[in-house]
Amino acid sequence: MMKYLLSRILLFLPAFLGAATLIFFLIHLIPGDPVEVMLGETASPADKETLRQELGLDQPLLAQYLRFLSGLASGDLGDSLSQQGRVMDLILRRLPATLELTLAAMGIALMIALPLGIVAAVKRQTWMDHTSLLFSLLGLSIPNFWLGPLLIIVFSIELGWFPVSGRGGLGHLILPSITLGTAMAAVLTRITRSSLLEVIQEDYIKTARGKGLSEWSVWLKHALRNSLLSVITIVGLQFGSLLAGAIITETIFTWPGLGRLTIHAIQTRDYPLAQGCIMLISVSYLVVNLATDLLYKFADPRITYEK
Amino acid sequence: MLPGELCICQEKETTTSHNFLSGKIHLIEKFTTRLLLTLSLALVPQLGCLPSSPSDRPPGYLIIGLESSPTHLDPRYATDANSARIAALIFSSLTRMDERSRFKPDLAERWEMIDERTYLFHLKKGVTFHNGQPLTAADVKFTYETALDPKNQSPKRGLLNVVEAVDQLGPYTVRFRLKAPHAPFLESSMLGIVPEGSPRGRDPTENGLIGSGPFSLEKFLPGEKVVLKANTTYWEGQPSVPGLVFKIIPDAIIRVLEFKKGSVDFLQNDIEPDMLPWLKSNTNASILTRQGTIYQYIGFNLEHPILRHREVRHAIAYAIDREAIIRHLLKGLATPATGLLSPLHWAYESSVLRFSYNPEEANRLLDQAGFLDPDGEGPLPRFKLSYKTTTLDLRRRIAEALKEQLEKVGIELDVRTFEWGTFYEDIKKGRFHLYSLAWVGIADPDIYFTIFHSSSIPPHGNNRGRYRNPKIDQLLDRGRRISNLDERRGIYSRVQKMLAHDLPYIPLWWVKNVVVMKPTIRGFIPYPDGDLISLKEVSLAIPYPPS
């Protein structure tokens, strides 16, 4: 297991380098001049050129790329061009908010999807199954930018239960995490259901029943555990994309997370900040990927990473 | 059948053990559902009341919703509109502008022009910064010198570049010496004054900023909020409200919902026109609309082989039904424009060529220019043009309306929408046929120089259409050298008439300022340029209860 872990960590490096290269060159391909954003249009060409030199933006792209890589190696993401402060500080300031929203959305998705998926599988072809299918379809079809305001109108304006937007206590977290978690819950419900139905056909399930185990035990202890591999895979992928920026949800609920920061960085051509935010997203995908693979071991003890 | 119960007769595949499981699940479901329902009804509403972060509404503070965060509050670095407006509440300046874009005293009790290159400002005595430190000429000198220093990378340096030196002649007298006669210089006297000894360059936190304005900075969380506290020693008298909270709410619908809920008290502009009728019927808001100075226009690329013909530009102007767009898409929140300067401006000229909707005249001009309709009433166009705009929903709808109107005179418009940065880069580089944008914050008519002088073609200015007219150049050169107001008015009158004839821009409309506020708020005067300085004079008819 340790060997596997070490080999995966070593594999990080080429993946990390590939992501860094792609991010750097793609961002620099976007039209726009960050120097003009900083100095404004009325700045003289001489002043713009001076600043360009100070920021190293007059250097050949390859030189800028190598400087970027050396900064990454030492953990220095540079200074933001459009906002005050170091890129790392700006990201770390926003990261807790994004983690809070992501984990809450994930929690809500699992709380909805697992029971619903199990009931849909057990009660296949009944109205409960059809209801879960309807929920999944609606959850995937309803866009965040419609669901969010709808929840606000009902639960915040009409009922007055929750604040409209912003980050604060638990009350501020409920509506944005439901908005963000609904689509994931929809996917997970179907995955849970279909995985369970696949597993329930296996011979060991028939053996379990033949041994006289209760159906409760058969479904929840044996079938569910073996169907969790697919669920874990989807949760891992979804978690990464949630972390990537629930941009629409953050905008609707004025949630001070990384998604809005990333969009702002790209719109203002703040190269260091955009690079930093997107690198963080890439790293989080890699880490979540690894965590997902390690979780398989616990879900299915037959899985071994030793050769 | 009660919710949560199962109808066993509907099960298609049953086994003995499956029935047993169904029964067990049924019992668990029933119990769990009822338990959860009870808990939800009791507890969920309480979640909203759980202790949240330190109050969003300090007692008595006014909450203002903003669509975007200010980036810098230091006046030497504040370039975007929200930064400039909030900075103006924290920092006083030598002069301010009134609602007719005329300069009036602020920190300076008077000023005089010694000669064309020398201005003398006499400061008010007894003015203090928020920390109690007296404001003197040394602070004015410090502010301008740090803004002019290339090492500090102030975006205001370009505007102030005409200043050769700032001299302190006494504790309350400042002299500005200019490199050359420059009539618009007074616009530079609206820079907020910072105390001597403030950080010379960009301050990473900006939470320690000290000004002398009606409000002091309590807290600045970029992307979230700005909190200002009333300055109890403000030289014009302490504001009636104890403080202001500028809450950043990027989504237009959410801003309005926050207002409906009561967690925002004041909104100015950035309200979708469709939402006003809803606000009127669903809230008790006071809604003010006033003539504004934001000028929306269509710009031409005058190097385009078709658009360089003046008749074509006139024809396009005649083909656009601005009144219909204002009525149906903008819900009346704009006034058809005749030029860059609004009727509120001291230099406004009303006797200019105007283009009312007249598709017949448009067709005649296009025929005259030699661009005949190849198939009369048929679908083939005379020619095709591209029209670039941003991805904002309202801009897209306006673009579709323009497309339809131009189709009626045989011009096919290819509408292309882009994210702001890409769009802006394209128009600066001249990669467009037509585009639409707005000018905001028009103060001195010298803005014509940066937009239409032949030396202002990008990257040196904003003459994006590459307009060249030697007569206009001469007039604009004179306009920035002559200080006499009447003479300048005459110069810019001629400029406006010539531009209305040449039509490098089609004037669309001046956007009205819209203010939506709680009916308890009294005394707010909307400024034409959207300035929020009037917040220092507002009072609440019924004070807010302490939170």
Image: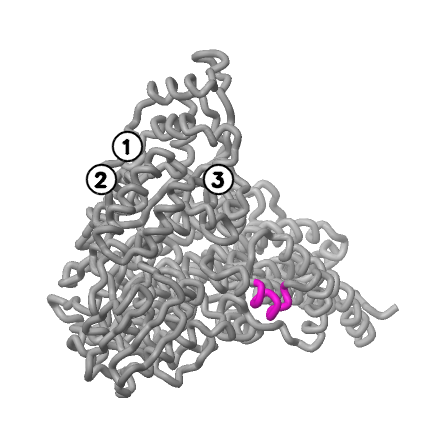
Mark 1 neighbour class, 10 Å CA radius: few under 14, some 14 to 19, many 20 or more: some
Residue B171 location, quadrant: bottom left
The local secondary structure at tag 3 comes to strand
For the point 27% across and 62% down, the residue is: B264
User: Where's residue B197, x and y in %?
Assistant: 39, 85
- Which secondary structure type mostly characterizes the magenta part of the structure? helix
Provide the residue designation for mark 2: B350
Q: Earlier in the sequence, mark 1 or mark 3?
A: 1
Q: Report the front residue among B255 and A224.
A: B255
Q: Amino acid at mark 2?
A: Ser
Q: Chain of mark 3?
A: B
Report if residue B19 is visible in the image: no
The local secondary structure at tag 1 comes to loop
Provide the residue designation for mark 1: B354
Residue B210 location, quadrant: bottom left
Q: Nearer the viewer, mark 1 or mark 3?
A: 1
Answer yes or no: do the residues labelled 2 and 3 have beta carbons within 8 Å? no
Q: Earlier in the sequence, mark 2 or mark 3?
A: 2
Provide the residue designation for mark 3: B388
Q: Amino acid at mark 1?
A: Arg
The local secondary structure at tag 2 comes to loop
Q: Is residue B319 left or right of residue B290?
A: right
Q: Amino acid at mark 3?
A: Lys
Q: Residue furthest front?
A: B115
Q: Chain of mark 2?
A: B
User: Where's residue B263, x and y in %?
Assistant: 28, 64
Q: Nearer the viewer, mark 2 or mark 3?
A: 2
Q: Which residues lie in the magenta part?
A: A49-57
Q: Is residue B282 above or below residue B174?
A: above
